[in-house]
Image (cartoon, rainbow, N blue to C red):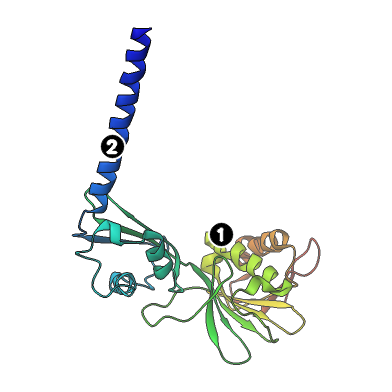
Amino acid sequence: MKFKIKTILTFLTGGVLTLTLIAFSSRKQSDRQIDQVSIDILDEKGNFFIDQLEVSELINSGYPDYVLGLTLGEIDLKALERRIEVNAFVADAQVFHDIKGNLKVKLFQAQPIARILDLKGESRYIDSQGYLLPLNAKHTARVPIVELAGNNDWEKNIRESELGERLWELLTFIEGDRFWEAQIAQVMIDEEGIVTMLPQVTKQEIHFGTLTDFDEKFKKLKVFYKEVLPVKGWNTYEYVDLKFKNQIVCK
């Protein structure tokens, strides 16, 4: 019985000691002063819409003084993330600290997949999630131009409407294929929703038809580029029509 009581007391003492050490360690960590802020901006496409100076300004905007010199306990990491994500070109921000107490910022940029022109003459980017982004003086993304003949009421995202959802699917399809990403320069949509594309290299208009059957139409278009043009000549035809089932019409 005495052995059991002794064992229980040993476990209790060990548990209290462990909790005390954890609490002490946590308190000690929160008292650490921030001596360094490291900002890592990630972008697989090589776009530079935001730089480290801008991120630093966003980080420091909520404090009367710079973050450097504050303690970890004085910093709200989630609030910092939200502050950085206010920038339209920031898709996601992660703020954390290392064991030395240094502040780390990992930032993922939004990925423009097209630049859209509307009837009002306004020009904005469309990102990979369909969000509308302003133009950026620092950098111009090499993406297809979209000309829209009809009016739209998109506020933040083109996927707010059925037409916008189908357009986003088309742009995502193009962006996801290295061949088409390099080949398609412009996408024009008339008031009826009919699509015409212009290529980067050759002069033929691509009569795509409605925003449907992407796989089938692009397969036919690839046949046109790979098998027809090398034989007939790159500038022989004025247009290629993909609207008809199981056939390519060239003129």
Q: Residues within 10 Å of mark 1 (few under 14, many from 20)?
A: few
Q: Which residue is mark 2?
A: 20
**Residue 13, numbered circle:** none
Residue at the image point whose x is 37% and y is 65% from the top: 80
Residue 234 to residue 44: above or below = below
Residue at the image point whose x is 23% and y is 48% from the top: 28
The amino acid marked with disc number 1 is: Asp
Residue at the image point whose x is 34% and y is 24% from the top: 12
- In terms of depth relative to the viewer, which is nearer, 185 or 5? 5
Of circles 2 and 1, the one toward us is: 2
- In terms of depth relative to the viewer, which is nearer, 144 or 22? 22
Horizontal arrangement in the rendering, residue 65 relative to residue 120 (left or right): left
Horizontal arrangement in the rendering, residue 80 relative to residue 127 (left or right): left
Q: How many marks?
A: 2
- Mark earlier in primary sequence (2, 1): 2
The residue sitting at the bottom extreme is 120
- In terms of depth relative to the viewer, which is nearer, 66 or 28? 28
Q: Is residue 208 visible?
A: no
Q: Is residue 22 visible?
A: yes
Look at the image and tell me in which quarter the C terminus lies: bottom right
Secondary structure type for disc 2: helix
**Residue 177, numbered circle:** 1
The amino acid marked with disc number 2 is: Thr
